[in-house]
Image (cartoon, rainbow, N blue to C red):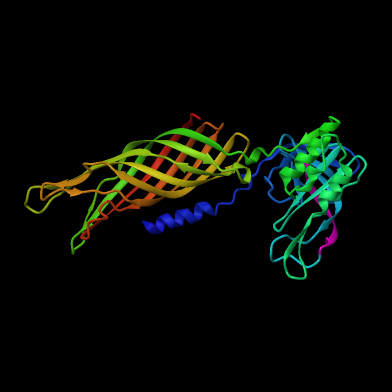
Amino acid sequence: MKNRFYTILILLFCIQINAQNIFKKGYFLNNSGDTITGYIKDFSWNNNPEEILFKSDLSDSQIKFLPKDIKHFEIYGEVKYKSAQVDIDISGNSSSLISENRSPSFVKQHLFLKILEEGQANLYQYRDRNTIKYFFSTEEVSLQPLIFRKYLDKNSVVKKNNDFRQQLLNELKCETLSESDFKNLKYWEIGLRRVITKYNSCSDNSTYSYINKKSKSSFHITIRPGLQLASFSTEEGSENVQTDFNTEVNFRIGIEFEYVLPLNNKKWSLVLEPTYQSYSSRKDRPFGDLAPSFREVDYQSIEIPLSLRHYLFLSSESQLFLNGGLAYDLNIEGNKITSDLGASIDLKGSLNPVIGFGFRYDQKFSVEFRYQTYRDLLNEDFFRESNYSSFAFILGYRML
């Protein structure tokens, strides 16, 4: 049974579905100045993209564009990127990448720059695995890097080149901005956006401000009734006498609490689902000429599965999802195995793995197939062991 569980787990999490990221409405501006509307594949980029995938219509084949191929692109209501050939400092700011050179080490690259603020002054961001760089421009100043660099002095002490403060002070002249706004300005998105926004408000000339909608977490509550197909067996004594009870179908009901994590386009969430479930069965066993003997099991509990969920987007309205986690079983008093041949045996709850595969539609309705494997309800009994496992079909309605 354990091997079956791990096989299913590996298969589910190795599934590769191309629909994990969906095409969303947007446009790009080509190098001739023409605006081309259609659909752009949203990868919820953490690092700046090196290319984009575009479709004129959802039924068309996708086309790849590099930064050199277009001027800029936008996914409506989500994000905008500008294509530009810029000087970028290739040094990083981690301890392993710091050099003794105070001056930037510029190289020329053609990149997609994320637009953070747009107006009379513009702020752009470039992020890769090693660093984050910022760029700015105004109506009078062409696009240029904001200079910030960590370096080692002659005594191997880490210093900072904060020339970006002077750059912005020189160019952003506004009655609402004073020298104190730049004196301790950090090379962070929040601070840089604040001074650019202040400058644009002077002339009432702010045309775009990036809002990171994907950084917002969310919380949902779902009612989850279903049917559970459960089996139970015991093995006892030195001769390993085994009793295989019947597979039974029972009703189960749970309340799911889901916290959607603010990362990777809301594809990951933590799920807690207190669930009432029950199982009862009887096994008759003839013993030669003796009267038939029987064993009965009655078991009910509150399961509390804690799982990590991953969504695979098919469209804006439908998603597949995978769950994986552990279920803790809160035993209800009176769970026993009884027999006409001996004393009753108490059943105890335990911890066991759980996996699930499901589909959600319209953000409200869901269906899930869930498998729980190997729960030993006799885990405190040295001379006996048991195997309780279940397969559930679960419906869901999201109330919040």
Extreme residue in the right direction:
140
Q: Which residue is drawn at 18% across and 64% down?
A: 238
Q: Where is residue 60 in the image (x, y as percent from the top left)?
A: 74, 40
Pick whichever, 392 or 261, lies toward us.
261
Q: Does the magenta stretch include residue 111?
A: yes
The relative height of residue 77 versus residue 240 in the rendered view (above or below) is above
Q: Is residue 180 left or right of residue 170?
A: left
Q: Which residue is drawn at 23% across and 43% down?
A: 335
The relative height of residue 61 versus residue 50 in the rendered view (above or below) is above
Q: Is residue 151 magenta?
A: no
Q: Is residue 109 left or right of residue 39?
A: right
Q: Where is residue 167 in the image (x, y as percent from the top left)?
A: 86, 49
The image quarter containing residue 216 is: top right
Q: Which residue is drawn at 46% across and 46% down?
A: 307
**Location of the N terminus (image quadrant):** bottom left
Specify the principal SS of the magenta part.
strand
Image: magenta residue range: 102-116
Q: Is residue 192 left or right of residue 397?
A: right
Q: Position of residue 126 (x, y in %)?
A: 76, 51
Pick whichever, 13 or 102, lies toward us.
102
Pick whichever, 348 or 34, lies toward us.
348
The image quarter containing residue 117 is: top right
